[in-house]
Image (cartoon, grey):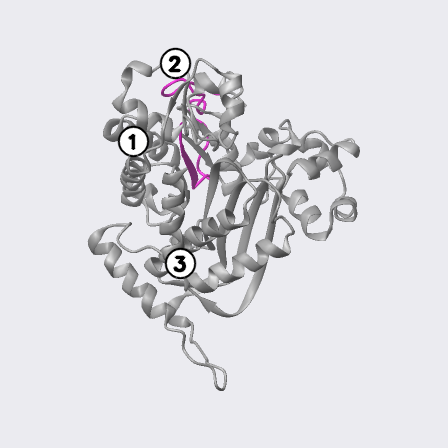
Amino acid sequence: MSRKQITGIGPAPRTGADDSGCPILHVDMDAFFASVELLERPELRGRPVIVGSPAGRGVVLSATYEARAHGVHSAMPMSRARRLCPQAVIIPPSHGKYSEVSKGVMEIFHAITPLVEPIASDEAFLDVGGARRRLGPPAAIAAMIKEQVLERYGITCSVGVAASKFVAKLASKQCKPDGLLVVPADEVVAFLHPLPVSALWGVGERTEQSLVRLGIRTVGDLARVPPGTLQRELGQAVGGHLAALAWGRDERPVTAHVPDKSIGNEETFAADVDDPDVIRRELLRLSERVAARMRKGGHVGRTVSVKLRRADFTTITRSRTLREPTDVAQVIYATACELYQAAGLERVRLRLVGVRMENLRPAEEATRQLSLGERETGWREAEQAMDKAIRRFGPDAVVPASLVRGKLDEIET
């Protein structure tokens, strides 16, 4: 497939590429957090820049392409990123700025089509099939999006244009940074088959190893394997899913206003922790945050999940489904503590803990049924009162006593 430069430094569609069967766009901001930071620090352009905690031990949130050239990538531990690129400038994150720009970018998308499916703060799928008569063919709409994002916010994005979400996302990745790539409907197979099999959604490290053992290294290799063989080797669902993707078959529509499937928070400690009291305090803090976010969004959930990462980066998750859905922090916290204890890690050094609520539903659809003789605890009403105080006086207006004691202990040490 030939490509031609349209804007920036990324590849784009060849002149006259047939986009008539390509209503799906995947728009992905380029190094989003880092790009927003460089708006205020233009003197750092052209240098390796990493967004993450300068002193903490968290992970890389974003990295410029100059840093990526040294092997740095998102979600990499900051300690490793510093070793790979010691000359990088490290900037602590400013999430408020990113949210503001993200909101503005999404407004650009919604001005084009109501069929916008955000999948992160910096990327979304758009179905522009209904906008063609008003705005022109999909490739022209993609170019207009790139121009508007650059003009309004001074940052670049890459856009994949294709007949399906799967291929559009692969196209945007292929043309980064600052590119625009159309994959015509009749060239999907030619585009897919040379790619490594790891490019397919659902192929993680273990699945890739299984495929390599079968001599399957490219998407084309996989496409030539009978679906029945893949299903025997990988399971009915995974085998069938990959067999379809290898030929570009992805029937999922762009779905606007996708509801939250889960709400969670996690924290990386400044130093590994093996004190159960400290772990439980952090579980309480995280449970409070998760519950507050659920109440703010009008959600309740039934499944509590905890994430426990050991000092050697081994990650363990445990979950439990409750009898009734809840948005009460004390219920979430009590369950999280039980899961932590059941994991058998009470004297194991941990570097990260997380709490997540899953199986969400709108709060107005959930009814609370008391068992015979059961009394209301009053926790929900108390936490709703805390929400009001926090909205009026700030995030530290009301906190559980154990968290206050934890802060005092930190000061004393």
Q: Is mark 1 on a helix, strand or loop?
A: helix
- Residue at 45% across, 22% down: 14
Left or right of 392? Residue 341 is right
Per the image, the residue denoted by label 3 is: 291
Q: Position of residue 228 (x, y in %)?
A: 77, 48
Magenta highlight range: 3-30
Q: Position of residue 357 (x, y in %)?
A: 48, 57
Per the image, the residue denoted by label 1 is: 149
Alpha carbon separation for disc pair 2 and 3: 40 Å
Alpha carbon separation for disc pair 1 and 3: 35 Å
Q: In which quarter of the image is the C terminus?
A: top left
1 vs 2, front mark:
2
Q: Which of 352 and 237 is in front in this view?
A: 352
- State if disc 3 and disc 2 touch (CB < 8 Å): no
Query: Which sits earlier in the primary sequence, circle 1 or circle 3?
Result: 1
Query: Which sits earlier in the primary sequence, circle 1 or circle 2?
Result: 2
Three-letter code, disc 2? Arg
Q: Quadrant of the N terminus?
A: top right
Q: Is mark 3 on a helix, strand or loop?
A: helix
Three-letter code, disc 1? Val
Q: Nearer the viewer, residue 126 or 306?
A: 306
Alpha carbon separation for disc pair 1 and 2: 23 Å
- Residue at 39% across, 24% down: 178
Q: Is residue 87 magenta?
A: no
Q: Is the magenta stretch mostly helix, strand or loop?
A: loop
Which residue sits furthest bottom? 372
- Residue at 68% across, 32% down: 220
Query: What mark, if any, has residue 47 been given in the picture?
Result: 2
1 vs 3, front mark:
3
Which residue sits furthest left? 392
Residue 232 showing in the rendered view = yes
